[in-house]
Structure formats: structure tokens, C-alpha cells
Amino acid sequence: MSNGVNKKIITSIIIIGAIILGYFLGAGNKPVVPLSSPDHQEAGNARIPGAHHIHALAYNYDGNLLLGAHGGLFESKNRGKTFEKIQTKGSVNADDWMSIVSHPQNRKILFAGGHDLGVIKSEDGGVTWMRADEGIKGTDIHGLAINQRNPNWLFAYSVDNGVFRSKDGGVSWKRMDDGPDNPGVRSFAYMAVQTSMDKSMGWDNWGLLFAGTADGVYQSFSCFCGWTKTTDVFNNTTVYTLAALHKDLEIMYAGTKDGIWKSGDEGGSWENLNGLKGLKIAAIAINPDNSQEITASTEDGVVYQSNDAGDSWQQMN
């Protein structure tokens, strides 16, 4: 074989190698996709395969994250970097999870609600579930909250059927009222703060039930004697999720299409936190062991975490 032919072969090999190398280098240096773009939304779904729309976050008994979605119940053992679907057992009649709450004294005990799910209860951290909705009309549960001062008291919103309360840990329920005048309740949160009305009436099971709706945040006293809009900040704005913690009876977080909002006065005034503005936040959870740690998820499953009560955020997945 002549030297000329050898040179041609070597040149061809070099060119092909350069093309292959350039391809992989280019794939590894794609421009950052803006968070609001459709491409990022598709990537969000790909981060948690099978999860689809995200609606709920909670910390379980060992500090891991539980995520409820239109696609099942998922768990992360690495602070939200990856999630695996839990193969649930028992009375789980649907895969559309809207709310998850944990018992403050025993976080192996969980309650959950969702589309066609009703209210269900787990005593093993989320694997095995039983029905816990005797007395609730309807099975489409959007809002679910627990009185963390007295965890036998639970509150649920059944779509088109109103607000129901349990005083025996979910064994039985009683209808209380229609809920806020504005339809479209998306979430509940209970803040076990003693109000002036509680003091004047001498009530023991005091507190405020908050509802995130299609027109902002509403609250009801424990007497269920009417609902009041807490602020005009969220006028005509859907509040997809609310989060409060019994260890801090003033702080509450809300998720909207424009990121996370924080209240330091029981929902009276709100601040739009930096870092996640412009993102549709569908789920928020406060670490019960460390109230400075807040985890949030967009509707498409991009998970963020703050270690300073919302002042700064880090994307986890």
C-alpha cells in the first residue's frame, strides 16, 4: 500500500474522530434551558418518571420525602434528587394523590387524599393503606389537614360536598360546612394557634383552618362560623399548596404560579420569596425536625430545597 493511500486513511480516521468527539462535546454543553420553557417542563416530567402532575410533599418518619402525584406515591431517600414509586398495598383505589399529612407524634402514621382516593390511612410509613373516611360524602378529596396540637382532629375537603371534620383520628367524620364561598379548594393547612375567640369561648381544641383556593387564602375558626379571606395579595390567584408547622405558629408558606410566598403573621401578610419567582409551585413541605429546611416542587416535578427558611434555594434534581 502506498504512502499516499496511508495518508488518506489516516486523514479520514482523524476527520471521523473529530466529528464524533465534536458531537459528544456538543451534547455535553447544551445551553441551559429556561425554567419557564416547554422543554424544561418536559424535562421535569422526565425527572420523576410516571409522576405526571405533582400535588403533595411530606416528610416521613425517617426524614425521607414522600411525593404525591397523578401517577402514584413516590419516595426520595436522597433529599429529592431521585424518587421511586412506592408499591402501595391495601385500600388504594386510585393513583391521583392530592394531599399527604403525617401524625406529629408518630410519623409512621400518614393520612392521604386525592381524586377517587377518599381519605386513607397508613401506619407503616406509606406502604399499606386502609380506608379512613367513614361519614365523608364523595371520594374526591383536595384539602387535608391535621391539628398538630391534637392529632385526633383532622379536616378534609370533599369536592362539591364541603368540609368534614374527624375528632377520632379518621375513624368517623362529620360535615361542618360548605367551605369557602369561592370554589376550587386546592389545599388545607391547620395552624394550632390560640385565637382571641378561642380564649373568650374557653375552647380547648383551638386553632385556624386555612384553605388555598382559586381566589387566594381563606380561614375559618374552629367553630366553623364562617370563612374569611385573609389577604387581597392573591386575588384571582390559585393557591395550590399551603404548609405550616406546629413548632412555629406564625410562619406559613403558599405555592402559586409565581413561586413561593411566606407569611410571618398567620396569613395576614405575604412576601414573595426570591429564587423561585415565576415557577408554578404545586407542593411545599417543612421538615418537622428542622423548620429551616423547606422542600418545594413544581407541578412538573422539579424539586428545590432551602436550608434557611426560604431565603435561598437549591435545585435538587
Image: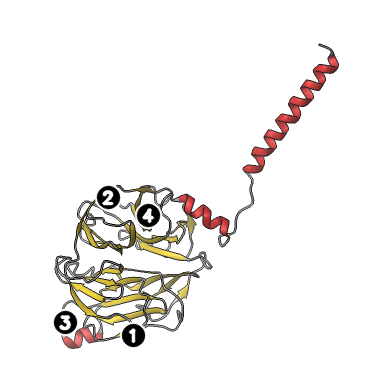
Q: Which amino acid does label 2 sit on?
A: Thr
Residue for point 52% across, 57% down: 41
Image height check: is 268 above or below 130?
below
* Marks 3 and 1, the one that precedes in the sequence: 3
> As shown in the figure, which amino acid type bears the numbered disc 3?
Trp
Image location (x, y in percent) of residue 150: 18, 69
> How far apart are labels 1 and 4 at the CA level?
34 Å
Judging by the rendered image, the residue that carries numbered circle 3 is 203
User: Does the residue at mark 2 contact the one at mark 4 (Cβ under 8 Å)?
Assistant: no
Instruction: State how far apart marks 3 and 1 are (Cα).
Output: 20 Å
Q: Distance between the residues labelled 2 and 4?
A: 12 Å
Q: Which amino acid does label 4 sit on?
A: Gly
N-term-proximal mark, 1 vs 4: 4
Q: Is residue 221 above or below residue 99?
A: below
First along the sequence among labels 2 and 1: 2
- The answer to whether the residue labelled 3 contacts the one labelled 4, judged by CB atoms less than 8 Å apart, is no
